Amino acid sequence: MNVRLMLTTWTAFVFTGLATLHAGDTTTGFVSKIHKGPDGESKYVVFVPADYKADKAYPVILFLHGSGSTGDDGQKQVKAGLAKAIRDKKGKFDFITIFPQAKTKGWQANGENGKRALAILDEVQKDYKTDTKRVYLTGLSMGGFGTWSLAAAYPERWAAIAPICGGGDPATAAKFKDIPCWCFHGDADKVVPADRSRAMINALKAAGGEPKYDEYPGVDHNSWDRAYANAELYAWFLKHTSK
């Protein structure tokens, strides 16, 4: 082999190797992303477990924030709620967790924010190795309403749901009665009365479902810190897979 051919072969080898290394690089922790959709660019965040490797399928949580995190900065939605619980666990969290941000109030399934959240979920599932049978949905307050709405509209997408201090339409309960549900609310909630969650739980039971419901005595609107700090919630998620 002449020198020129050797150099060409070596250069190709080096660049191919670098490309492979780059493709294999994965940033873990809270990773900022940009989704490009019909309404332009939308910032969001993905939490990637510390042990992430592309040869293992990871369970996924889609988290819907409350109204106070509405905006387009791409960061307010990871200041509290599930993101706080993940930070409190000091990185020992085994779910790829998606944090979209609503640009306006509301996460309803037929609204732009709800549609964008699902598009971002699809995007993350293409970018990372995920377990398609272990996709979980949760949200607080406005995100709790969104959880009920997205569960009713797309019951086939979720292995389990965990709505917190929100409410939904009891008439839709039969559509997702078979999805495992663990709902949380504070009985002293002055923002979203606990009756909203009670109505959904009763409707699911009447439709033949078997939801779990934790109502915290004396707790006002912030029932999410206690709910997301509960390690049993994540173990419960993992017990359920979609069909």
Image (tube, rainbow, N blue to C red):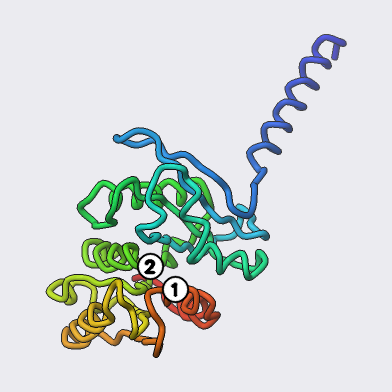
Mark before the other along the chain sequence, 1 or 2: 2
Task: Say which amino acid is labelled 1.
Answer: Trp
Identified at 82% across, 15% down, the residue is 7
Please determine whether, in this image, residue 212 is positioned above or below residue 88.
below
Residue at the far left: name it.
171
Label pair 1/2, CB-CB below 8 angstroms: yes
Question: Horizontal placement of 15 versus 99: left or right?
Answer: right
> In the rendering, at what x and y percent does residue 67 appear?
35, 58
User: Split into 4 quadrants, where in the image is the N terminus?
Assistant: top right
Residue that numbered label 2 is attached to: 140
> In the rendering, at what x and y percent does residue 75 appear?
50, 49
Residue that numbered label 1 is attached to: 224
- Tell me the quarter of the picture where residue 208 sits: bottom left
Please determine whether, in this image, residue 29 is positioned above or below residue 21.
below
Pointer 2 local density, CA inside 10 Å: few below 14, some 14–19, many at least 20? many
Between marks 1 and 2, how big is the CA–CA gap? 7 Å
> In the rendering, at what x and y percent does residue 78 appear?
51, 56
Identified at 31% across, 84% down, the residue is 211
Q: Which mark is residue 125?
A: none
Secondary structure at badge 1 equals helix
